[in-house]
Image: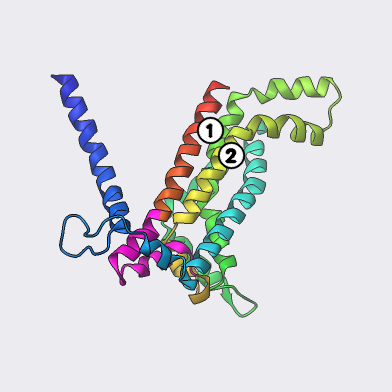
């Protein structure tokens, strides 16, 4: 009886998550969807064709991919030294302070982050409001913890202290240790964090809608505006974002499995 109850609860939970996604995908393949449970005229791809003919959506996708890619690169250059500094530090107080500062963006609402950035970067000497550069900077702040946590977990698994001592006993320089030992061993965590950061950046809405301008809107902002048009058009735009998110999620799960095995 308990097993049946657990299966029922699990099945209900999965349906609760999957039904909206399935309906959106069906809506992207339907011709008309007004006032009915399922769309009418299924298996048409005209909404996808219209979507890729719209310059506004193509531009928004390019900006989202640019911001997401640069956010990954920036977080790697920021996150790796931060994780290493936390790991090798002998001060517990300093570690707690650094951990708190790094994970603070998760606790602070994006609305607060965006408001602070607007106030600071709206000065006469540095007007960045409405630019994709400010959106990128906000995404770097917002997604940094999602890079640091996988890399930090990976670093704890490889026993860096032992590897470091072995490398030093053989006369390896610091640069050689980082390039040939540390980074290759942290590659699963780096890749996992990169996929997570890219996914978070690609789907982030609150920061982008407040900080971007008309010509620098990201894909989620334009996607929100799509719902004022045809339902099938909005569903096709949403399906693309869902597909990218699912692909990234599968990649993260695969890399986490590799990290545990290693």
Question: Would residue 30 appear left or right of 134 to someone viewing this image?
Answer: left
Q: Quadrant of the N terminus?
A: top left
70, 241: nearer the viewer: 241
Q: Position of residue 88 (x, y in %)?
A: 67, 32
Instruction: Give the residue at x 31% y 72%.
Output: 229
Above or below: residue 44 compared with residue 167: below
Above or below: residue 183 compared with residue 221: above
Q: Position of residue 178 (x, y in %)?
A: 75, 34
Indicate the secondary structure of the residue bearing disc 1: helix
Indicate the secondary structure of the residue bearing disc 2: helix
Q: Magenta region: which residues?
A: 217-239
Above or below: residue 122 compared with residue 184: below
Q: CA distance from mark 2 to mark 1?
A: 7 Å
Q: Quadrant of the C terminus?
A: top right
Above or below: residue 127 compared with residue 195: below
* Residue that extends furthest to the left in the rendered view of this protein: 1
56, 2: nearer the viewer: 56
202, 88: nearer the viewer: 202
Question: Would residue 242 appear left or right of 24 to someone viewing this image?
Answer: right
Mark seen at residue 255: 1
How many numbered dots are placed on residues in this image? 2
Question: Would residue 116 appear left or right of 7 to someone viewing this image?
Answer: right
Discs 2, 1 touching: Cβ within 8 Å: yes
Q: Which residue is mark 2?
A: 191
């Amino acid at each position: 009886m308990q097993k049946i109850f657990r299966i029922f609860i699990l099945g209900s939970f999965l349906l609760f998550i999957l039904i909206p996604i399935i309906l959106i995908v069906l809506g992207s393949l339907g011709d008309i969807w007004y006032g009915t449970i399922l769309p009418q005229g299924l298996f048409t791809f005209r909404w996808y064709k219209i979507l890729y003919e719209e310059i506004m959506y193509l531009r928004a996708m390019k900006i989202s991919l640019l911001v997401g890619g640069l956010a990954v690169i920036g977080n790697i250059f920021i996150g790796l030294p931060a994780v290493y500094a936390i790991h090798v530090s002998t001060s517990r107080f300093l570690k707690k302070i650094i951990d708190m500062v790094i994970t603070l963006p998760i606790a602070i609402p994006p609305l607060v982050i965006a408001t602070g950035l607007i106030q600071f970067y709206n000065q006469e000497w540095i007007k960045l409001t409405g630019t994709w550069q400010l959106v990128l900077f906000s995404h770097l702040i917002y997604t940094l913890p999602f890079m640091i946590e996988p890399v930090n977990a990976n670093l704890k698994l490889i026993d860096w202290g032992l590897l470091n001592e072995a490398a030093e006993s053989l006369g390896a320089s610091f640069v050689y240790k980082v390039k040939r030992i540390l980074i290759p061993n942290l590659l699963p965590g780096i890749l996992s964090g990169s996929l997570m950061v890219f996914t978070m950046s690609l789907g982030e809405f609150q920061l982008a809608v407040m900080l971007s301008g008309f010509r620098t809107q990201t894909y989620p902002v334009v996607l929100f505006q799509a719902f004022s048009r045809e339902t099938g058009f909005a569903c096709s735009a949403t399906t693309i974002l869902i597909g990218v998110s699912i692909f990234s999620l599968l990649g993260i799960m695969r890399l986490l499995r590799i990290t545990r095995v290693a």
